[in-house]
Image (cartoon, grey):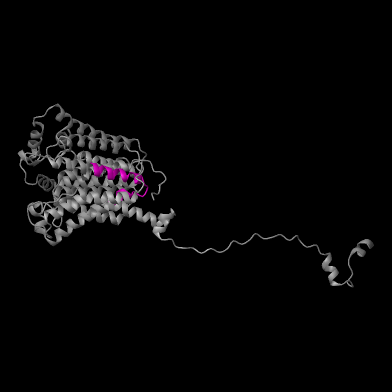
Amino acid sequence: MKSSVEARPTSSEPSATKLTRISSPPVTERPPVPPVTRRTTVSPLVARTLRIPAAGPSHERSVRFRVGVTWALLVLNVLTFYPHTWSGQPLILHIPSSIGKAITQGALPAALVMAVIVNRRLIVRPSVFLGLISLLVVEAFINALQARHFGTIYRSFRLGGFVFALWLLSPWWGRRDLLLVRSHVITTTVVLSFTILGLIVSPSRALGGGRLGGAFWPTPPPQVAEFAAVTLGLVVVMWLAGRFSGWGTLFVTCIAVLILYLSHTRTAILALVLGIFVAGLSMISTEARVRKLFASVGIVATLVVITLSGVVTSWLLRGEGTQQLTSLTGRTATWLAVVNIPRNLFQVIFGFGLSNKSANGLPVDSNWLASFLDQGVFGIVVSAAALLFVLVTAYFTPRGVKRSLALFLATYCLVASFTETGFSDASTYLLELTLAASLLVPSGVYRRLE
């Protein structure tokens, strides 16, 4: 005890002595503080010159906008134009024939320019589907070498530019946000809005001949019905998969059903019903909405058949007699004329070259007969291979909204191809089948194209 007391410092020692006896921790140097840097705004021109990556969200919005504009221009290029309504009445806004054709035909060069702007490196994605469609382009140029009419040469170059634009859009295939599908829905909605506006402004012109057509832009009833049916089908399938709002789906359904009723187009309705049925079957085991929809539609269809079968039958007949129904409104006579055209072996295999899809002044109205007329047996085989490739690929694709949308579009194109000019040339059906093929590629990391 004594030694411990002596070791303890006494109170008489100065305070400085106390401080010297306290062990202080070792002094460590702090890392230097980095200087504060200011964020500078770089102009787009300087960013492109110095290869500075653009801002993420703004760049992505710009890309989506330009891709959507490119797709809209391709749709505009395949719209029909003549300087009056389909029933022969003047348009609400008079558009000279030269200006109207310049708008539709000039839309393709504009789409190519926009596609090159958004895809400046000209990067394309490998695609069996586009490879098959490109075979039709090669065959069209072979026929153009011996063509006697300038129209055949022009249509060949037009098809080549159209397919090249689709190649340039291939890097945006398979996106999870369904960019191309939404672009197509927005574009067709704009066309349908002008049709409804024409119906409101001048019902006599829009309903001339008893069927709804375009009164501002001369969209014929079959094309109006196609846009309404495809838009309705895409929206319904997205709603079934939980990718579209309920109120928005209800609004689109009401407008589209009204347009289909006024257009009196049976092919579009049949293709729509079968397309939704096939797409719904692909989701019936995973989506409760599909099972509820099928049950509700079954009950409503039964009630309609029991109570309104006469009204539905008279609407489907459109005042046509038995002879018109059996001849598919005169189509079979035109198809027979196409088959009976004298041909040599080369023309049987490769056809006569791209034409306006008519025989004896009447439209062929069949993808397969029109392919045989223009591109021979080769065109039929390639068209069938492209459609079969989409259907087989969809079968082996995992369940999901993209697979269901692709099945709807492929089924719609298959049904419509028997009575409508389809996907062997630049048309809305080629766009829709390309849209189906774009949904079936695997989703990967989106590669920014600068």
| Relative horizontal placement of residue 21, taking residue 199 as reference (left or right) | right
Q: Is residue 21 above or below residue 371?
A: below
Horizontal side of residue 403 vs 73, given as left or right: right
* Magenta highlight range: 160-184
Above or below — where is 321 with respect to 372? below
The residue positioned 26% from the left and 33% from the top of the image is 385
Which residue appears at 18% of the width and 45% of the height? 268
Residue occupying the far front of the picture: 49
- Position of the N terminus, as image quadrant, is bottom right
* Residue 173 located within the stretch drawn in magenta: yes
Confirm whether residue 347 shows in the render: yes
Answer yes or no: is residue 408 visible: no
Q: Position of residue 295 (x, y in %)?
A: 27, 45
Residue name at image x 32 percent, y 43 percent = 438
Q: Residue 288, position in %: x, y?
A: 34, 46
352 or 4: nearer the viewer: 352
- Main SS, magenta region, reads helix
Membership of 225 in magenta stretch? no
Q: Residue 93 at x, y = what percent? A: 13, 60
Above or below, 380 relative to 205: above
Q: Which sits in the foreground, 240 or 158?
A: 158
> Which quadrant would residue 316 be assigned to in this image?
top left
Quarter where residue 45 is shown: bottom left
The location of residue 90, given as percent across then percent down, is 8, 57
Count numbered badges in the picture: 0
64 relative position to 10: left or right: left
Quarter where residue 16 is shown: bottom right
Which residue of the protein is positioned furthest toward the right in this rendering? 2
